[in-house]
Amino acid sequence: MSQEILAVYPGSFDPPTNGHLDIITRSTRLFCKIIVAVTDNCNKKHTFCLDERLQLLCESTKALKNVEILPFSGLLVNYLEQINSFVVIRGLRVLSDFEYEFQMALMNRKLNKKIETVFLIPDQSYTFLSSSMVKEIAMLGGDMSGLVPKCVAKELKNKYQKNEYTK
Ligand code: ADP
């Protein structure tokens, strides 16, 4: 039964990290197709524009056949209905993620009682990893290996080195 299910992994992925990829890879073993839905939220200031985030995710997931990267805006429950999906995937790293994720899952269920949120736990080595921490390390010239895919490390370097020279 679960082999037939289309699941959606929403997030800002600003930028994608090896933690996100770990969750995507685990999801592909559980569901027949995964849509990574990249948020285009004008109220949120992103470091990487939508096109950059879409491109980086496409490049990082090209070996995974049942993954599609798509932009999305508006209410997640409406998007799920449009594409005929009822499963949301979210990653849980540490206890502090839980409160927000729990609230979101219950709110989505309140908006549409058919929605189920599936929480996946990444490999232990990624539980400390977040997009914001990765950006801080890149800004300070730290080593990105093992934290983000190669294409992301390259873009982070470009972005922050460029800023360095234009300061
Ligand atoms: P959002 O803006 O929705 O929090 P993110 O791109 O930061 O978007 O995260 C998307 C999802 O991926 C969230 O469920 C988040 O908890 C999860 N996530 C982020 N980093 C990791 C990680 N290192 N390991 C596992 N899950 C993660």
Image (cartoon, rainbow, N blue to C red):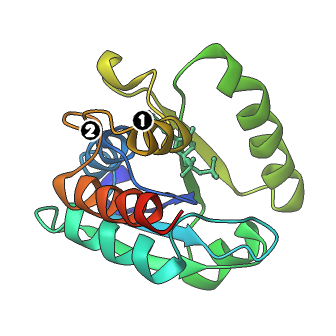
Q: Against 4, is 140 above or below?
A: above
Horizontal arrangement in the rendering, residue 80 relative to residue 141 (left or right)? right
Say which residue label 1 marks: 137
The amino acid sitting under disc 1 is Ile
Identify the mark at residue 144; answer none if there is no mark.
Answer: 2
Query: Of the residues under marks 1 and 2, which one precedes in the sequence?
Result: 1
Q: Where is residue 59 drawn, in percent x and y? A: 21, 70
Q: Is residue 13 above or below residue 98?
A: below
Q: Amino acid at mark 2?
A: Met
Q: CB of residue at label 2: within 8 Å of ligand 1?
A: no
Rendered residue at 57%/53% (across/down): 88
Question: Residue 46's spot in the image, x, y percent?
Answer: 62, 65
Q: Are discs 1 and 2 less than 8 Å apart at CB?
A: yes
**Residue 75: quadrant of the picture:** bottom right
Give the image location of residue 89, x and y in percent. 52, 48
SS at mark 2 in the image: loop
Please identify the quarter of the rendering in which residue 132 is found: top right
**Structural distance between the alpha carbons of marks 1 and 2:** 8 Å
Is residue 61 visible to us here? Answer: no
